[in-house]
Amino acid sequence: MEAGGGGGGYGRRRWGWWQEVLPLWRVLLASSMMIAVVPVRARLYQAGADPVWVLEAATVRKVLRGSPSAWLVQFYSSACGHCVAFAPTWKALAGDVREWEPAIRIGVLDCGDEANYETCKDYGVQYYPTFRYFRAFAKDFMTGENHHGSDRELQTVRQTMIDFLQNHSRDTKPPACPPLEPIMPEEMLSLFNKGFQHYTAVIFESADSYVGREVILDLSQYENIVVKRVLDSNTAFLKKLSITSVPSSYLIYPNGSHGLINVLKPLRSFFSSYLKSLPGIGRKPPPTPIRQNQEENQDIKEWKDFDKSRLYMADLESGLHYLLRIELATHKTLEGAKLKTFKDVVSLFAKLFPGQQPVMKLLETLQVWLLSLPLDKIPYDAILDLLNNKMRISGLFLPSRIQWVGCQGSRAELRGYPCSFWKLFHMLTVQAAVRPQVLLNTGFEGNPQVVLQVLRKYIRDFFGCRACSQHFEKMAEESLKDVNTLDEAVLWLWEKHNVVNARLAGGLNEDPKFPKLQWPTPDICPLCHEKRNGLHTWNEAQVLQFLKRHYSSDNILYTYTEEGSKEEADENSHKKDIRRNEEWIPDLEQQLDPKSHVLLPKNQNKPLTKEEMKPAVSFLGIGFSNVDMSLCIVLYIASSFFLMIMYFIFRMRSKRRKLWHPRPYV
């Protein structure tokens, strides 16, 4: 596929040198490399308020490595609607098994927080929510063991936690975990003849029951009581103790008496509550706890007034930033079908996104670079270098902070990126229908489903919310094949967005200030709504006109953008480029593996001298453009080849003269 439009040859002339230069040198910043963002942190879970351990990038490795407790950690994203809906269940689970600490702890890590996404990438987390089990006393860094299965009922997760604890070896078993294996009937009989100063409760149950082990863990932090379990395989023994059904509990008192416990229902909660209420039973003095950092009140920033009939570039740029720098960052390497999907996404944005000039130059540069590199596999870090303009090419800039305006929610974890994601692809479908000529010579022309197909592949390969991805895939399988024109593509995405709104309306991830209604509402498009035979119906012709008007570039407001306004974008971008060119930049040497066509890092974090740390494209305070740099490199390479050819020509001539005219011997 050509590098976009009719300018494929021009793109090759400008960027062909990158095939040699970029694989050899990647420019990185030292400590100042980190993306300068001011995120609005989500509050799905709050340290100290919720019964979960809220982990962060700075603490998660220290907490998990060598921990005397096992861990079950949920890696979630505050931008994932399914994660938001699942949060009450996870909090309920953590509260339900709080007594099981410190044998096993429940933790969370927000991969939607930009401070954590590098850590989530290290743990190989790509989709949300992801559940990982970590064994106690792990000496080395581990990515954890996946929790397989779609059943996330509390009972199922509790049972999986117990299985995980029992799978620990004797040396690595958490010290606070009591024995969970059943005892033999003979061992229980011996308890009758021993004098103890504590209660001994014995749970009789079947081999596939978890009640006994749950009660053992429930009482593990209480003193003056020991809980054991016996299987129901010896019917004669059960009959001797007058046990007619399982699960049942038998209690041996400190004075030596014993008998069955009478509870209303043979359930874990009834057994545990009864045993905790016995005289003399109390909680053990807690060990020195692991202190959680109390979170400051950072929920929502100052509310931004906005016009719901308009689009805001701040929302679109924030969504693009999240898509490229955060969601994609969970993939360490892009290859095969995923690399092809990413190239298609970048190509569509480079052609159709009505962004400000610095953003568009960055997208076009990224597109040409991706299409020109002869690589089958590209590390994400190389893509991030280009997104952050580490080559210091003048005029390239994508804001690296999140600034929701029309997509802001009443709480930090609501709306945000999902709202912006929808707006971005609605924008692409409309722009493809209004300006189809920009897709000529890209390989996309003549395909009315092109934006929807690329969207479908992106959601399948990269979108963090797995449940959302599955729902969208099901909708695409059912009706995407019926889209025959670019206008029908606009209406298809609008219709499916409303289907999603109807499915999520009233759910836990719905913002009460912005309920999920069928859109557009009558107040912003009265002609879109009709009544036929007393029933509401859509006037799709009016809806199409409204969508083309709403997602046109003329309807975009530049309030709250980093540049402030579209007219100021170029000037501010030039100022930022000069400012960035004045920073010190260390290098990272790379090599291109010719066999596998993979960009490989080499000598990472190699320090450079201060003399070597010079601006890449600044001379006498003037920033060179990408065209200037391209011409300089092309002329340099051409001159080098010319000099080499001339050298070899004169060398060969000299040898021939010596052969034809040998010197006479004296």
Image: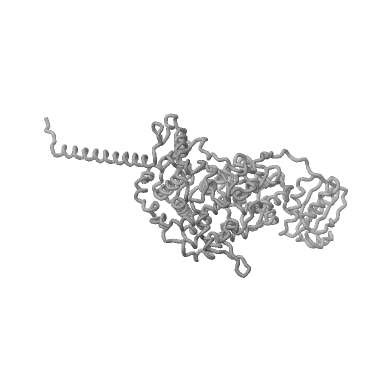
Q: Position of residue 372 (x, y in %)?
A: 39, 49
Q: How many marks?
A: 0
Residue drawn at 34 percent across, 50 percent down: 9
Which of the pair 343/596 is nearer the observer? 343
Tell me the quarter of the image containing the C terminus. Answer: top left
Picture colour scheme: one colour
Tell me the quarter of the image containing the N terminus. Answer: bottom left
Which of the pair 137/506 is nearer the observer? 506
Q: Position of residue 210 (x, y in %)?
A: 72, 56
Whether residue 505 is visible, yes or no, is yes
Give the vertical position of 4 relative to 488 (above or below). Answer: above
Give the vertical position of 230 relative to 585 (above or below). Answer: below
Work out which residue is located at the far bottom of the displayed protein and give it: 533
Q: Position of residue 232 (x, y in %)?
A: 76, 60
Q: Is residue 151 left or right of residue 18?
A: right
Residue drawn at 22 percent across, 38 percent down: 651
Whether residue 326 is visible, yes or no, is no
Q: Position of residue 260 (x, y in %)?
A: 84, 56
